[in-house]
Amino acid sequence: SRVVAFMNQKGGVGKTTTVVNLSAAIAEAGRSVLVLDLDPQAHATLHMGLEPGASERSIYDVLLDPDEAEHAAIEVRPNLAIIPAEVDQAAVEVELADAVDRRSRLRSALEKIRDRYEFILIDCPPSLGLLTVNGLAAAREVIVPMQAHFLALQGVGKLLETVQLVGQNVNPKLRVSGIVLCMHEETTRHAREVVADLEQFFEQSRGTEVPWAGARVYRPAIRRNIKIAESPSFGQTVFEYARWCAGAIDYQQVAQLLMEEWDQMLARRGMSEQIVTRGVSAGTAERTTA
Ligand code: ADP
Ligand code: MG
């Protein structure tokens, strides 16, 4: 499965909104998705319409005992499951302080259940603590939600270096797939300049060894849209709350892109049987290295 951590140590940049709405769009396209809510604020859990603490098991229980993963996922929509957060899960830092495998608990948990889902999206807290480290260790890719501000641009280099640093320790295969621009003000010249700078930054990294050598700025940028901001308080995705608003259309298109990227990745790996089950001819799939 495609396991992606949505990470930015800044809060309020659009991580949770992006995880919830992308996962909803992918699930609506008929593909199975699992969301992992690593943030003790439990915003993704609430956004999906669940009460934190109401379910029997949370991601906290899974981190304490990876065998719990089998029973922790809750089906919240067709094709869409979540392992919810609970508010005191920050205590995991203390509880696991002496565990030698503390950074790879989530990875162990996913190994048991990942075959059931085609996409696994991880909502990371706005910090670099043990919860986020578990997210980065369990994922294959990182996507960075951010806003196209000048300061955000300076921060992005730093953030990418952090991903690299964490990656070298716990997950050398971790790659940065790209940036999703959230709350985008497309009409301002400033935003356009920042996007151009970002693209240039990634262009210069092509062919190098850095984890973001293959990264892109996902299009379209997600426009700032009031419906997106209103939907969480109803426990609804933006598609349930206002399917035809600008924000829903933007997220739908980025979700489409993520699915296409994944199909291309599978084709490149020559995993033809997975493609056949989706009704696409696998005759041309190359058998290159996995
Ligand atoms: P993070 O998870 O990074 O802390 P959130 O996804 O919670 O960020 O977003 C922060 C706030 O911005 C939330 O209130 C959310 O509803 C709002 N928001 C996110 N994306 C948009 C958007 N495209 N338009 C308007 N409001 C948005
Ligand atoms: Mg959040």
Image (cartoon, rainbow, N blue to C red):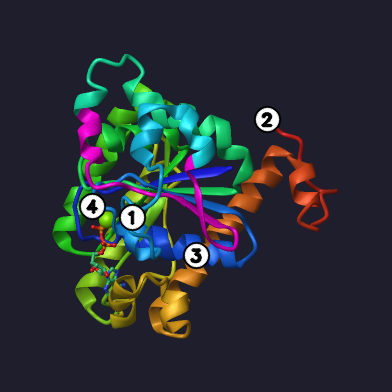
Residue 137 visible somewhere in the drawing: no
SS assignment at label 3:
helix
Which label sits in the foreground, 3 or 1? 3
Tell me the distance, in whole angstroms, between the alpha carbons under discs 2 and 1. 30 Å
Give the percent coordinates (x, y) of residue 233. 29, 73
First to last magenta residue range = 72-93
- Left or right: 8 with respect to 256? left
Q: Nearer the viewer, residue 107 or 95?
A: 95
> In which image quadrant can residue 116 be found?
top right
Q: Is residue 178 left or right of residue 95?
A: right
According to the picture, the residue beneath numbered tag 3 turns out to be 24
Q: How far across and how far down the image is residue 176, in percent? A: 40, 43
Amino acid type, residue under disc 3 in the picture? Ala
Q: Amino acid at mark 1?
A: Gln
Which numbered circle lies on residue 43?
none
Q: Which residue is mark 1?
A: 200
